[in-house]
Amino acid sequence: MANITRYDPFEDLFKEFGKGFWVKPYTFPADTSLEMKIDVKEDDKAYTVKAEIPGVKKEDIQIEIDDERVSLRAEVKKEKDEKKDEKVVYSERSYGMQSRSFTLPAEVDAKDVKAEYKDGVLSLTLPKKANGSATRIAVG
């Protein structure tokens, strides 16, 4: 009777490297794309928007309001603080432009908008236009 063995090409490959060889598992880094997360709340007179924009200076934030459309943009800049004999091995910090646009159900009074940026959170108070054409309909 003949001895039958199963051939495994990977077994031979790893035997060649000896006992000191190990394979580091490769994983893809978490999604490092820039993403601006927002919360929008509404009351009778205004909308309140909170946007998370960490690592940004308030001078690098742009807010545009066109009737009921709100656009937020912020630029995250890379700091140039590298030492002479230092190299980056791995970095999950993202740099670049963040933007977010959304449409509200009613027009915004752009002249009375209030904006504050503190601890990485942009807070906007967007008052509704007084002469909006919104009407409430009762269901009968």
Image (cartoon, grey):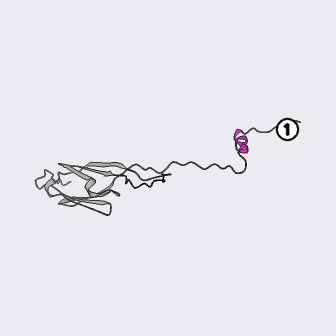
| Residue closest to the far bottom | 119
Determine whether, in the image, residue 102 is placed left or right of residue 35.
left
Q: Is residue 27 left or right of residue 83?
A: right
The total of numbered circles placed on residues is: 1
Q: Residue furthest left?
A: 131
- The residue wearing badge 1 is 3
Q: In the rendered structure, does residue 3 fall within the stretch colored magenta?
A: yes
Residue 19 seen from this side: yes
Q: Nearer the viewer, residue 87 or 71?
A: 87
Q: Residue furthest top?
A: 2
* Secondary structure found at label 1: loop
Magenta part, dominant SS: loop
Find residue 59 and report its horizontal and vertical position in percent: 25, 55
Of residue 30 and residue 49, the one placed in the foreground of this image is: 30
Q: Quadrant of the C terminus?
A: bottom left
Residue 99: horizontal and vertical position, in percent?
Answer: 30, 48
Residue at horizontal 19 percent and vertical 51 percent from the top: 106
The image shows residue 47 at horizontal and vertical percentages of 22, 58
Can you see residue 109?
A: no
The x and y percentages for residue 90 are: 49, 52
Give the residue displayed 51% in from the left and 48% down from the top: 28
User: Residue type at mark 1?
Assistant: Asn
8 relative position to 71: left or right? right
The part of the chain drawn in magenta is 1-25
In the picture, measured across the screen, residue 92 lies left or right of residue 63, that is right
Q: Nearer the viewer, residue 26 or 87?
A: 87
Quarter where residue 17 is shown: top right
Quarter holding the N terminus?
top right
